[in-house]
Image: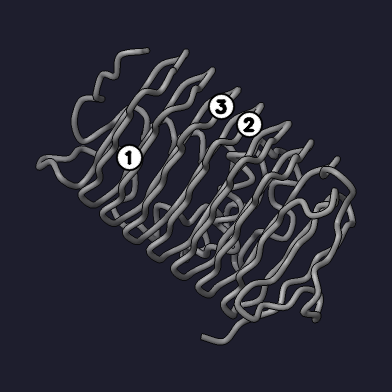
Amino acid sequence: MLAGDVTVSLLDGVRIVGDDAANSLTIEVANGNVVVTGRGGTTVNGSNQSVTVSAGSIGTGLNVSLGNGHDSLRVIGVEVSGATEIAMGLGDDDVTIDGATFGQSVVIGSGAGDDVVSVLTSTISGDLSIYTTTGDDSIQVTGSTIGGNLKIFSGDGDDVVNLAGGSVAGDVIVSGWFGNDGTLVESETIDGNVTLQARGSVAGNNFGNLPTDDNDFWDVDGNGTAELLKDGVLNIRYLAGFRGTVLVEGALGERATRTDPAEIVAYLDHVYALLASEPAHEPLDHPRT
């Protein structure tokens, strides 16, 4: 598969943007510096050489948008002070965060495809939000400390979620959509409430005011088409707490009918409130340990 090129810039934080080829890269600490290295033929800023983005740690935020294609991202042993936003495009994507430390919230979003998201032995001071769409996805959060809430929303497909050996200071919400989903919570210390929901495997679903068509459901800007790099970005920014003009900047599709930031927030507030309150069956009780 044709490898691509990613562009790394340091304007207003560390920003990494990929093309629509198969991008594969690692963000890690080497010789005391945070470096971005391409793998499998992927180039960085047009070069086969690693790019140094900071000394020691990333003192600002981290924004990664890899575009479409079968992409792979590894974030290994890095410390990030600001908010982190990772957007994977269409394709079978793989995101691994291992041994990293984040001073604020982390949001990971992926598009249609069979995706794997792993957060391993990491510390996140704020919320961790993981958002996937259509495909048979695998999501694991193991051995990690979450200082805020843990929110996992998986789309259509037979998805597997595994939470084990870590702690969450806030609430845990795991919500699936159509498909036969499985959730395993094992040896996890949770201080807040736990809501585990599965959809699609139980007859007689009642989705209230939620659109029944998946495309309509994720059409956040109301232009008739759910686009990962538009509607998906709006969703990721919403989950990350972005509000006002920064929420919608560059993320509205052509002929969008829902363009006001407050209107988009109200729409997504409504969607996630319904997701949390209208499961296909009663939420599973998980004893706190």
Question: How far is disc 2 from disc 1 in space, using C-alphas?
Answer: 34 Å
In the rendered image, residue 101, in percent from the top left (x then y), is placed at 68, 36
Q: Earlier in the sequence, mark 2 or mark 1?
A: 2
Q: Amino acid at mark 1?
A: Asn
In the rendered image, residue 15, in percent from the top left (x then y), is placed at 78, 58
Which residue is outermost to the left?
203
Is disc 3 placed on a helix, strand or loop? strand
Left or right: where 133 falls relative to 156: right
> Which disc is residue 239 wearing?
none
Mark 1 closeness class: few <14, some 14–19, many ≥20 residues within 10 Å: few
Question: How far is disc 1 from disc 3 in space, using C-alphas?
Answer: 35 Å
Q: Is residue 71 above or below residue 12?
A: below
Quadrant placement of the C terminus: top left
> Which disc is residue 209 wearing?
1
Q: Earlier in the sequence, mark 1 or mark 3?
A: 3
Q: Amino acid at mark 2?
A: Ile
Q: Amino acid at mark 3?
A: Thr
Q: Is residue 161 above or below residue 187?
A: below
Q: Is residue 134 above or below residue 7?
A: above
In the rendered image, residue 181, in percent from the top left (x then y), is placed at 25, 46
Question: CB under 8 Å between callouts 3 and 2?
Answer: yes
- Between label 2 and label 1, give the one nearer the viewer: 2
Task: Tell me how the rendering is colored.
Answer: one colour
> Which disc is residue 124 wearing?
2
Is disc 1 placed on a helix, strand or loop? loop
In the rendered image, residue 250, in percent from the top left (x then y), is placed at 72, 60
Disc 3 marks which residue? 145
Quadrant in the picture for residue 208:
top left
Left or right: where 31 falls relative to 207: right
Question: How far is disc 3 from disc 2 in space, using C-alphas?
Answer: 6 Å
